[in-house]
Amino acid sequence: MNEGLPPFAGLCSPADALRPGLSVEECVAWMKRHHYVLQRLHQICTARITAEPLYELKTAFSLHAYLCAEHASAIRKRVNELREPPLGLEVIPHRGLQFCCDEILAAPSAKELVLGLYEILVPALLDSVRDYQATTNPLADSPSIRIARFCQLELEDIDHFGRQAVVALVDDEFRAALQPWLDTLRQALSAAGGLSGRQPECGPLPSPQFSATPYVYDRVPRRDARFHDSYNAGVNPEAFLYDERFQPRDKVLMLYYKRLRELDVPEMMAGIIHETAGKPWKFYADMSRQLWDEARHSLLGEAGFRSLGLDWSQIPINFTWSLNLNTQLTPQERHAVLFFIEQGLMPRTGKRYEWEVAQASGLPLTALFQDFDWADEVLHAQLGREWYVKDFPDLKSALDYGDRCWTQVMSHWRDYRDRGLTDHRNWWPDLYRQACARWGVAPDPAAIEFSETYADTRADLKQISASG
């Protein structure tokens, strides 16, 4: 009756089920190395988001930090199941792994960073995850295999991106000049017995190069050349969005602008994650999810403009929200502002309103994007209650503190203009005319005349400027 049915619940062949595999102690030791490197990859990516100018790297680091946090969390749970009290997950498995990660964290530019990340560390981790699955007993250690399979799947995605990034950014001359450093990273891994620790430890640790000077987090956000006139606050999109005179289809342009501008949220959140010490790991994992969501919202804005055949790089994408918060507030104060704004998106005039505008616009893609954007922000408000509000006596106290922190931020609107950093040009009429030409309709004269700025408007609960 059982002829042709897969044995062992389809997990593996009889031969694989009978292979000796690894003991619980060996499994835990190996997984702890994966956990350490995933946490360090998360740290490296998070630390470099703010000051990295390239949009593609900034958003990719946001994604990769989130994915690494997810897989580190899964390993933590599995180690906890394998009778390992105390867990010892904060112990550095080997100084060679630490050396390699410290060197990459301190890489002086994007070129060194992508080489260290995507040519050395990520491939080594991916190989080790594959080796783990090939070595452990697939029946006895089935839960660990499942975790490793998911980890491998997304590490392969990271590796695929990384290889393309290396090709795009690093030429042969630069690689040749950097070869001695790459060799030190390989030597550090060899000294650790490979990333898995199951190879013979080979040779001493090399001398540090980039990490000889301790890494210092850079709070100042930077953008590439496509983000021109980033100090420009000459258009207040919320004022247009909430003005009943204007048509939903026209308001879609402001929705896409607001989404794309959300790039400043991961630039700000990266510092909250990197500069906040002593929290449970779940805090960093949850905040990394929100950080990636905000970066993804920026990509939704890019996709929206592309769908309309409009060049988003012709629009000044303001970055002074992240700049001012990062340079004027502490990490806790930034978190307070973040929650204050997120909570302000929950009433009917917030995310629901944006979704209703998108629904009424007749543009299905906009409605889809706003639907998911709204769902994300509900999650973010919940995360804020979990990791921010609990430090206060009640919700009102938490909101009041966020309001006070937001009030003390100086916008420097006129100062930026007077210093010649921007003239706060009204870019809206040009964008609107281009969109109307694409749609084959005549511009609304009232919409063309829109010119409200942020000069005298605080972007808070009533006029939300950045988050969302």
Image (tube, rainbow, N blue to C red):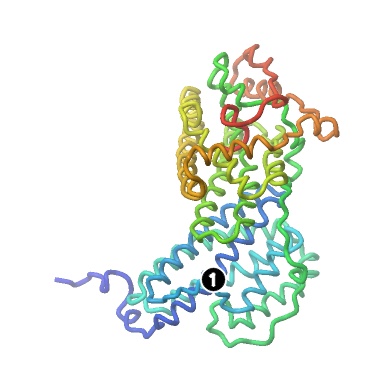
Image quadrant holding the N terminus, namely: bottom left
Left or right of 100? Residue 137 is left
Residue depicted at 61% across the width and 22% down the height: 239
Q: Quadrant of residue 451?
A: top right
Check disc 1: other Cα within 10 Å, few if <14, some if 14-19, many if 20+: few
Identify which residue is drawn at 77% across, 65% down: 172
Image coordinates for residue 282, horizontal then vertical, percent? 48, 58
| 21 left or right, relative to 314 | left
* Outermost top residue: 445
**Farthest front residue in view:** 393
Q: Position of residue 338 (x, y in %)?
A: 58, 42
Q: Is mark 1 on a helix, strand or loop?
A: loop
Residue 279's place in the image compared with 384, above or below, is below
Q: How many labels does the image show?
A: 1
The residue that label 1 is drawn on is: 90
Query: Closer to the camera, 431 or 268?
Result: 268
Q: Is residue 118 above or below residue 230?
A: below
Q: Does residue 447 sit above or below 306 in this rendering?
A: above
The front one of 344 and 74 is: 344
Give the x, y percent position of residue 26.
Answer: 45, 82
Please give left or right for residue 123 compared with residue 135 in the image. Answer: right
Residue 134 in the image, given as x and y percentages of width and height: 44, 77
